[in-house]
Structure formats: C-alpha cells, structure tokens
C-alpha cells in the first residue's frame, strides 16, 4: 500500500514539474507590433477613377481594425459607399515569420478576393499583389503614407504588365 501511495505521489510530482516547465506560448515580435499603426477606427474619403472597378466618383469608408486573439493578426472590417453603392469588406494583416514579409488577405461584398505582400520603409507601407480579374492577371500596388499617427493617405494602382501603372483610387483616412 505504501508503495502505491509513493508511486502516486511521485507521478503527481512529475506531472506538476512537467506543467511548470511547459514552454510559454510565443509572443508577437517587433515586426508584428509595427502593424499597430493601423489599429483603431478610421474614417476615409477617396476618389475612384473610372476603370475596371466601376464608373469612378467619390468613395467614403469606415474601417475598424482590431487585434485577433493572441496579437498576431490585425483584423479590419470596413463599410463604405461609392459610385456602385454600399460595400462591406474584411481583411487580415500579419507578419509572416516564415517568409519575412507582411501579408494581407481580404474580400468584399462586390465579390473581390485579394492577397498582397507588404513592406514598410519609414512611414510608407507598400502592398503588392496579383489577382485575376475577368480572366486577366492584374497587378496591384497599394501605397499608404502615414504622416502622423492619426492620418494616412493612400493610393491604389493597377497594372496588366507589372510595369505600367494606372491610378485607380487616391484618398485620405483619419483615426477617430
């Protein structure tokens, strides 16, 4: 009987020791934390140029970007109104430790799905991607300049060859 009690106590001690030595979950690094410049609620206004995404005109939007559980991904939900009517969208921004690059994945209520990789240089973020539209491969470049923590300007450009760029939209957002 004593040997069973001793064995049970030993097993409990080993299990407690294993739990105490379990590694802590990983924490986001400084690259991920740089995305915090986009966190919060933003209100924007832009001008869409006539082109493959519609007739052009004034676009208004509201974005709400919050950190997903664990702090690795920033989830942005948007709503807006433009020449083609109201839209909703959702996107995720994150740092890829594997690829050493920022990544974006998003979709909207107009049927678009987008992927992009990003880089930051000072207060300028540049996101580039390639997606099919109407059977054609379209290159996109989305540049965001953050002159202050509460303002940002942006320009969305597209290209069929990845060399000659056409501006599709330009605007400004302000943090609420």
Image (cartoon, rainbow, N blue to C red):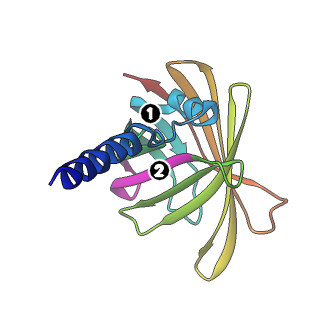
Secondary structure of residue under mark 1: strand
Say which mark, if any, is on residue 44: 1
The spot of residue 127 in percent (x, y) is 66, 48
Q: Earlier in the sequence, mark 2 or mark 1?
A: 1
CA distance for labels 2 and 1: 19 Å
Residue 99 position by quadrant = bottom right
Q: Residue at x 51, y 53 (%)?
A: 56
Q: Nearer the viewer, residue 117 or 138?
A: 117
Label 2 environment density (alpha carbons within 10 Å; few <14, some 14–19, many ≥20): some
Label 1 environment density (alpha carbons within 10 Å; few <14, some 14–19, many ≥20): some
Camera sees residue 141: no
Q: Is residue 124 magenta?
A: no
The spot of residue 35 in percent (x, y) is 55, 34
Find the magenta span and give its range.
81-94
Q: Nearer the viewer, residue 144 or 97?
A: 97
Front disc: 2 or 1: 2
The spot of residue 25 in percent (x, y) is 46, 42
Q: Residue at x 73, y 25 (%)?
A: 122
Left or right of 153: which side holds 40?
left
Question: In the rendered image, which quarter contains the N terminus?
Answer: bottom left
Q: Residue at the far right: name it.
A: 163
Left or right of 76: which side holds 47?
right
Residue at mark 2: 92
């Amino acid at each position: 009987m004593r040997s069973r009690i001793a064995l049970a106590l030993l097993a409990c001690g080993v299990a407690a020791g294993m739990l105490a030595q379990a590694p802590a979950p990983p924490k986001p690094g400084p690259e991920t934390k740089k995305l915090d410049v986009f966190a919060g609620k933003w209100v924007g206004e832009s001008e869409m140029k006539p082109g493959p995404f519609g007739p052009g005109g004034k676009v208004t939007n509201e974005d709400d970007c919050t950190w997903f559980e664990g702090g690795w991904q920033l989830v942005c939900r948007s709503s807006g109104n433009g020449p083609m009517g109201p839209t909703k969208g959702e996107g995720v921004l994150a740092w890829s430790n594997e690829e050493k690059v920022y990544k974006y994945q998003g979709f909207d209520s107009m049927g678009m799905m987008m992927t992009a990789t990003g880089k930051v240089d000072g207060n300028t973020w540049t996101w580039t991607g390639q997606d099919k539209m109407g059977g054609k491969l379209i290159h996109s470049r989305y540049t965001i300049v953050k002159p202050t923590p509460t303002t940002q300007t942006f320009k969305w450009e597209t290209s069929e060859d990845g060399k000659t760029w056409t501006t599709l939209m330009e605007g400004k957002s302000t943090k609420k």
